[in-house]
Amino acid sequence: MPGVGRIQARPFSSIDEPEDYLGRICYNENPLGPSPLGLQALRDEAVLAHRYPNWLNTNVESVLAEYYEMSSDQFCVGAGATEMIQKVADAFLGPEDEVITAYPSYTQIANQAITNGGTAVYVPLDENYDIDLSAILDAVTENTTLISLVNPNNPLGRIFTSDDFASFMDQVPEGIVVCVDEAYYEYVTDPNYETVIPYIQDGKPVVVIRTFSKVYGLAGERIGYTVSTPELTDQIEDVQLYATVTRTSQAAAIASLEDIDHIDATLSLNQEAKSILYAGFDNLGLSYIPSETSFMMVDCGVEVQPVAEALSEAGYIIRHGWDMPNHLRVSTGTIDEMNGFIEALGNALESVSVQSNIVPLSPGIKHIYPNPFNQSCKIKITSHENEKVLLIIYDTLGRKVMTLANQTLTPGNHEFSWNGKNIFGKNVASGTYLLHMIHGEFVSTQSLQLVK
Ligand SMILES: Cc1ncc(COP(=O)(O)O)c(C=O)c1O
């Protein structure tokens, strides 16, 4: 079974923010600031702050309808994608219901399902850190009412293609609503990526979530929306509060939608910032997950918490977590922020490695990812001296399935992978397997779940 239950996914950095930071590169905010047209509209509207806003955001909805050439009863506007995710969960997830989602991903909808008394099922990403759409279909049960996908995914920055989604939609059983969070839609450059809004135009039970927080630079204003069929939009509006979106947010959103210059400048800065990050990581010898968004994950090769702390001391706030203990997520920023961050990251890694040379690394199996896994998993271990390491997979009856390592390794971190095959090259059955690590005096065991 894939993982089930609540995942602690605070959207906030675990590091205290220094007041005089040099780079707040942890929340995927727009480093260029708000759209200038949006800012002007916001300022103009502020003088009416004593008057209630348009209660149900019909002003924004009709502008969106014109922009998308759809009907205004297909839009529901709320206080950021955050409110809309909650409303989608409230509309489609009752106490008996189940949502299926990927992990790591943006798990707010799954947590809301649990708050509503329902169940959340998490399906691990595949070995390329992509959302495993076929494993998601395999996880469907008679209680599934919602499948929630984030495309591009956060925190990985990876996409699924329009072809992948087409074949997925062909197999989604009737009666299930598919919600696709497209918060970073505008940033994607891969030509195989498309919005799923055309499925809505074909009457399919699809909800798309969009936000003004990212490319429009209005994260502090709190405005986002859903696009869906009129029937599903009705269901979302049934659970909606009124007047959660301020006048200034409504005005800023309407004006920023057409601020093409600001959008272009944002996207071109994003590309430049990503190039600086990629080159910087290459220079530092770090591997990273190429991203289609305004953030990316980099593998620091060591436990990342002390690196994050050293970065914070240097004024750069990043995020980490999602059961990926060696990765940090960095948002794109200004050119200065990117150059400064790369320099600070180099220093942070150096200071952490100096400290870890003083305190010897403890040997062991550090991380198995993903686990449960479908096709293959990565296994990170630490060895502490030039001594042989044996890494062997057994089944639960104690029979040897595969030897992954039987060699002398240099002290430090090493990565292996297992593709679910036995020593004869045959695929083994779904189930629990045990990974043993023997390293001199040291012995440890961890279990792996193969899910087909
Ligand atoms: C994938 C995803 N969805 C939704 C949100 C929430 O966006 P908003 O600021 O519109 O509430 C975020 C915020 O970072 C996000 O990354």
Image: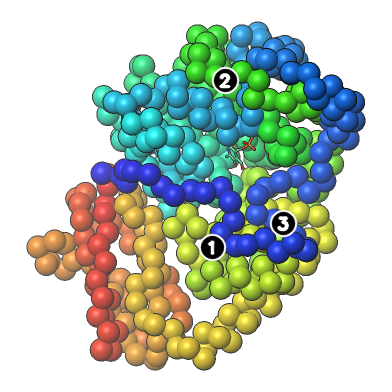
Q: Name the mark on residue 362.
A: none
Which is more N-terminal, label 1 or label 3? 3
Q: Amino acid at mark 1?
A: His
Quadrant in which the C terminus is drawn = top left
Q: Where residue 218 sits in the image (x, y, percent)?
A: 75, 36
Q: Amino acid at mark 2?
A: Leu
Which is more N-terminal, label 2 or label 1? 2
Q: Quadrant of ligand 1?
A: top right
Q: Amino acid at mark 3?
A: Arg
The local secondary structure at tag 2 comes to loop
* 384 horizontally vs 372: left or right: right
Q: Which residue is mark 2?
A: 241
**Residue at (47% x, 64% y) in the render:** 325
Instruction: Please state which of the two labelled residues, at mark 2 or mark 3, is closer to the viewer.
Output: 2
Q: Where residue 68 sits in the image (x, y, percent)?
A: 70, 17
Which is more N-terminal, label 3 or label 2? 3
Instruction: Count neighbours of disc 2 (C-alpha within 10 A) and say few if under 14, some if 14 to 19, many if 20 or more.
Output: few
* 42 horizontally vs 102: left or right: right
Q: Where residue 147 sits in the image (x, y, percent)?
A: 42, 30
User: How far separated are the C-alphas under marks 1 and 2?
Assistant: 38 Å
Q: Name the mark on residue 327.
A: 1
Whether ligand 1 has any atom under 8 Å from the Cβ at mark 2 is answered as: no
Q: Is residue 297 shown above or below 303?
A: above
Q: Which residue is mark 3?
A: 24
Q: Is residue 398 shown above or below 208?
A: below
